[in-house]
Amino acid sequence: MKIAIIGAGVIGCATAWEFLRQGKEVLLLESREGPGLVASYANGGQLSYDYVAPLADPGVFLDLPKWLLNPGSPLRFRPQLDPRQWCWLLAFLKASNTSTAQASTKALLQLSSLSRDTLHTWMAEEPIDFHYKANGKLIAYRSPHLLEKARKQVEYQASQGSNQRILSKEESIALEPALANLGQALVGCVYTSTEEVGDCHLFTRALFERVQAHPRATTRCNSRVARLNIRQGKVVSAQLSNGEQIEADQFVLTNGLQGYDLLKQHGETIQLYGLKGYSLTIPLPAADSATAVAAAPEISVTDYERRIVYARLGDSVRIAAMVDIGDGSAAIRPDRIRHLKEEVSKSFPRLEVERAEAWAGERPATPEGRPIISRSRKLDNLWLNLGHGALGFTLACGSAVLLNALMSQSTVPINALPFRTR
Ligand SMILES: Cc1cc2nc3c(=O)[nH]c(=O)nc-3n(C[C@H](O)[C@H](O)[C@H](O)COP(=O)(O)OP(=O)(O)OC[C@H]3O[C@@H](n4cnc5c(N)ncnc54)[C@H](O)[C@@H]3O)c2cc1C
């Protein structure tokens, strides 16, 4: 059985690799000149298995005025005259209640745990070079009130199997001396020893190269699928923008945000919207390890109130932040980068922000924060692996395993219902 996979981001490459591992024949199509150049390029690098709570939670109703009015807010909303934005936003507000947020968290924890196990299996089979580190994660709080609130989430997640601890300021600095850079501002942290980091683009590229070298696979870059040709409720071919027809038995959409457009052509609408974010990649100062307080943390850190994440990837630190709703493209806005650099300099003054490489990308997000991993509502041989939002790197391997099980009609490893097409 030949399967055409459309889109070679982290989701498409992981899907292709898992299908090959399970004996399938794969054709991987990518519109860009290489894999992982869109949302999977310079993301935060967090394999955030325990921090999966969706953006849609009851707190958004209090936060909304700030998102609209404060240009420096880490979350910003620009209303547009765009029905797609308003439909998404209404569904997002509808999902912003305690029971939906808890149901999504539970489903995402299962998928992330499957992802972690799968990644570890793949790495044990053959090492993957992507600056991977299992170095744990600290969520740093500046407000005692928010740290107290975090305690409740830690308790809820403990009931779902997570292993997290609340640390005082002193305990936090003892574990990660670079947090001394935050000075008086720090009140404490949530620590999760099991979190990991890596470079998503290197990972995507490494999987793509494995797929490329596999005898049952064909990969094609510079091959944009312009439309799906349909006959009698089935996709018969994917038509490339040069008119070429690509035939296969099954088709899988892993083309991130663009999945919306290909589905819409045959009248299938999914709620998928781009939440723009930014990253900075900064080379670490020379001889950093020789100084008393390192320029950047070794352990992955999230500055909770600023919504900024820090991860060491090789000789650099990757810093990611911001959720801009309604910016309309992945173009870099200089004011947002300037603001991010200022915040980083205040927290970690020895980081050389003037040497930073800036990037922006759009998280392909569903309103509830759960990806869609299922068969199309309309076409029998079309499958979706889309909408991984802020967690695509984290969830890629598990999503591939789940989709493979659904397509093969074998035992599904976790409850697949929360991920069905909505
Ligand atoms: C600032 C930021 C920080 C983030 N940090 C993290 C993090 O720390 N941890 C984490 O887990 N996740 C993080 N994410 C989210 C993660 O990066 C995304 O969820 C993930 O990259 C989505 O992968 P994807 O493969 O679905 O999409 P993409 O990477 O966008 O891949 C889709 C691919 O499909 C191709 N394509 C599109 N249309 C077509 C077509 N018609 N024909 C052929 N090919 C097509 C595109 O060229 C692209 O290569 C972050 C995202 C951002 C923006």
Image (cartoon, rainbow, N blue to C red):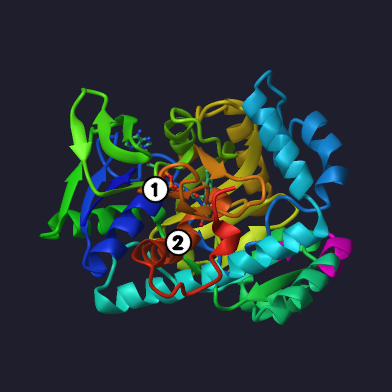
Q: Which residue is mark 2?
A: 399
**Dot placed on the residue nearer the N-terminal end, 2 or 1:** 1
Q: Position of residue 344 (x, y in %)?
A: 63, 47
Q: In percent of the image, x 24 and y 33: which residue is there?
A: 223
Q: Nearer the viewer, residue 63 or 130?
A: 63
Residue drawn at the location 60% of the way across and 60% of the way down:
418
Q: Amino acid at mark 2?
A: Ser
Q: Residue furthest front?
A: 232
Please state which amino acid type lies under the numbered disc 1: Asp
**Other residues around mark 1 within 10 Å, as few (<14) / some (14–19) / many (≥20):** some
Displayed-image quarter of ligand 1: top left
Whether the residue under disc 2 has CB within 8 Å of ligand 1: no
Residue 326 visible (yes or no): no
Asked which secondary structure carries label 2, the reply is helix
Q: Is residue 268 at all visible to an observer of this figure?
A: yes
Which residue is at a point 58% across and 62% down the rendered structure image?
Answer: 417
